[in-house]
Amino acid sequence: MALERDPKSGYLTTGHEWNGLTELNTPVPRLVFFVLIVAFLFSIGYWVLMPAWPVGTTYTKGLLGTDQRDVVSEALQQAAVDRASWTDQVARESFGQLQPDPQLMAAVR
């Protein structure tokens, strides 16, 4: 298999030919290697900084110490406090007593 140069593209060929199609020996662009290296380094940094891996009954906490469970739990507690003003009234009164109150009916809908 002699390596030849393709007359149209100028690239070397691999010597393989299928039905008149010659395989070119084109290098992978450097940008592709650069993007892969940057993505790999980003993933390593993300794994170290953020909670990432399950370990037994817990998980790795990460260096930043962020925990979405705490954030969601606090948001749910705040939502329950915000809803308590009208849910208590709905629980106490009958529908007939609630219907004339337009603000309450708008909140319930």
Image (cartoon, helix red, strand yellow):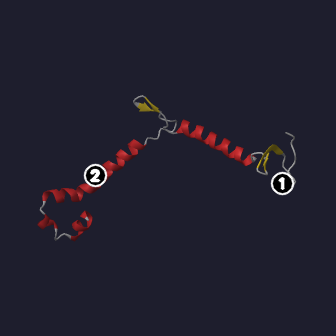
> Residue 107, which numbered label?
none
Relative to the observer, which residue lies in front, 12 or 85?
12
Which image quarter is the C terminus in?
Answer: bottom left
Please, what is the three-letter code of the amino acid marked with disc 1? Ser
The image shows residue 7, relative to residue 51, as above or below, that is: below
Which residue sits furthest front? 19
Label 2 Cα crowd, 10 Å radius (few <14 / some 14-19 / many 20+): few
Q: Can you give x and y, in whole percent of width and height, for residue 30 in the image?
A: 75, 46
> How many numbered callouts?
2
Q: Position of 36 compared to 52: left or right?
A: right
Label 1 Cα crowd, 10 Å radius (few <14 / some 14-19 / many 20+): few
The residue at 84%/46% (across/down) is 12
Please, what is the three-letter code of the amino acid marked with disc 2? Ala
The residue at 39%/30% (across/down) is 57
Relative to the observer, which residue lies in front, 28 or 36?
28
> Label 2, label 1: how many angstroms apart (C-alpha)?
68 Å
Which image quarter is the N terminus in?
Answer: top right
The residue at 48%/34% (across/down) is 53
Mark 2 = which residue? 80
The image shows residue 65, relative to residue 92, as above or below, that is: above
Q: Nearer the viewer, mark 2 or mark 1?
A: 1
The image shows residue 59, relative to residue 104, as above or below, that is: above
Q: Can you give x and y, in whole percent of width and height, for residue 69 in the image?
A: 39, 42
> Residue 9, which numbered label?
1
